[in-house]
Amino acid sequence: MKILCIVSVLCGFFDFAHVARADLAAEMKAAMAVVGPGMADAKSYLVDGRLDEFNQKLLALFPEKSRSAAQAFLLGDYLFPVDPKTSYELHKLAAEKMPDEPQVQYEWAMEQHRAGEYAGAVNSYAIFSKANPQYAPAYGLCADCLLNMGKIKEAVAIWKQSEQAPQGTLEQLELLVCAVNSHVYSDRERAKLLAKAKAGDVQSAEQLIRLDCEFERDWWNSGPNQDYLKHDLEILRKINFAETERATGVLCAGDSELIKAQGKAALESLLSKNGFLMGDNAKLPQSGAMLSILVGNAVAAQVLSIEDARTKWGKVIIDRAKANSDADLFQLAGALYLKTDQVDDIDREAWKATGEARFALAQLLVKDRQGTLKPDDPLLAAAVKKNPKDALLAAAALQQTIKAGKPAQEALVNAIKAEYSHFSPGSHARGIDIPRPGADRLAKYFAMLEKSMDNR
């Protein structure tokens, strides 16, 4: 586990070439030399879920009374992904004391951007870009702020500057957009859940193991965090939960994630020992999330086939999903019935019960393939209204608006905002086998938006 990858997003973007003052660059280098050794035990704090203690240890490296603006700036970088409130205040202090320093203003702009203070962010981005006019990502970030301020013409113009500027890459822009717009703080969420689970809250224990098994690091990287999972399971085994069977499901799901690499026999033994899924008297975990983990791992290890799981447990899973409006169970049911005639009914029930975009998208995709999706489709309208920041729904709404021959500017603006909120899957253009979320569509949408403005 690389601590810098976990704790610091902005440190990875810090570029001494963008620092105007030589004395600041020297002080930053000196401060970074202090932080490295001071963070030698950072991993243990993070694994233990003692995030606040970790933050305090970091802050104590440069006590507040004697902390310089450069030191505050560096601390803000390290705390950016785990403590947005503190990092905001640190970067604000640095920006106030160094109003003309481009790199400081750049990262202060990102803080304001993330906080929704778009006008302030635009001004701070402008200070950086005046000193670094060839750096493209700053323009791309500023365009998002301008669009959210309703300044469409200005947003289009500055996006064009991002395309023309020769320095920086699309991948850098994508990482920065994720940093300001993801609003996902997995380490902080885990710390809260771990504390509640220690107090005997079994629902928090379920959420904790689910988080550990699908730990979201950014828009591109998620999956089991083995260190966290091992630690948390060890803690949970020592707790006397009131709902013992529910707790057993939590531990079994977590263990299945840890041992799945050992193969079929190991997973069969675990499931049999706990009485889940296998055998004539087998049972299911009460939690939809825990059941999804178990079934997914059992199918992957060939302990169960999808057909066997559907035959034995399909109806029970669907009934439970409906009774509890459980999105995890609906998702599992959809996977089990994917190649059957029932999957459309499951998606309809799931959308009705949960209102989640993924279930509406599944139905809309079927309609689109059949050629029956219309611009005034009520499902599309309802799904977009309920999930305005979903990029795929916004794309569908835009497509249908254009198909109907209607003015598309509003739909384009909504689609761009949705892309900035979370990129939709992109192309295969960057040496990967599957489409990853990316900013590919932004360029396309901005070009369409400019054209729509020219035609008015």
Image (cartoon, helix red, strand yellow):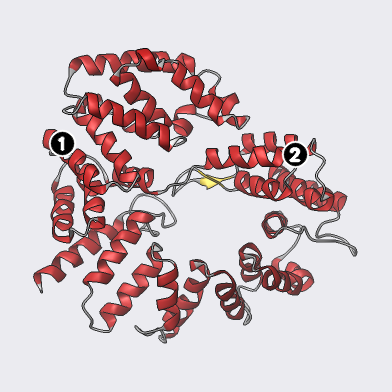
Q: Position of residue 44 (x, y in %)?
A: 60, 24
Horizontal side, residue 416 vs residue 448: left or right: right
Task: Return the disc, 1 or 2, that comes first in the chain's sequence.
Answer: 1
Quarter of the rendering occupied by the C terminus: bottom left
Q: Position of residue 95 (x, y in %)?
A: 25, 29
Q: Position of residue 123 (x, y in %)?
A: 18, 41
Q: Amino acid at mark 1?
A: Ile
Residue appearing at x 23%, y 18% in the figure:
24
Residue appearing at x 40%, y 85% in the figure:
371
Horizontal side, residue 392 vs residue 38: left or right: left
Seen in the picture, residue 9 relative to 170 is either above or below; the reply is above
**Residue 10 visible, this angle:** no
Q: For mark 2, give the secondary structure.
A: helix
Which residue in the structure is indicated by mark 1? Answer: 127
Q: State yes or no: discs 1 and 2 in contact (Cβ < 8 Å).
A: no
Which residue in the structure is indicated by mark 2? Answer: 236
Structural distance between the alpha carbons of marks 1 and 2: 50 Å
Seen in the picture, residue 339 relative to 139 is either above or below; the reply is below
Residue appearing at x 24%, y 43% in the figure:
121
Seen in the picture, residue 66 relative to 385 is either above or below; the reply is above
Q: For mark 1, give the secondary structure.
A: helix
**Residue 328 visible, this angle:** yes
Quarter of the image holding residue 299?
Answer: bottom right
Residue appearing at x 72%, y 64% in the figure:
305
Quarter of the rendering occupied by the N terminus: top right
Quarter of the image holding residue 382?
Answer: bottom left
Q: Residue furthest bottom?
A: 372
Identify the mark at residue 330; answer none if there is no mark.
none
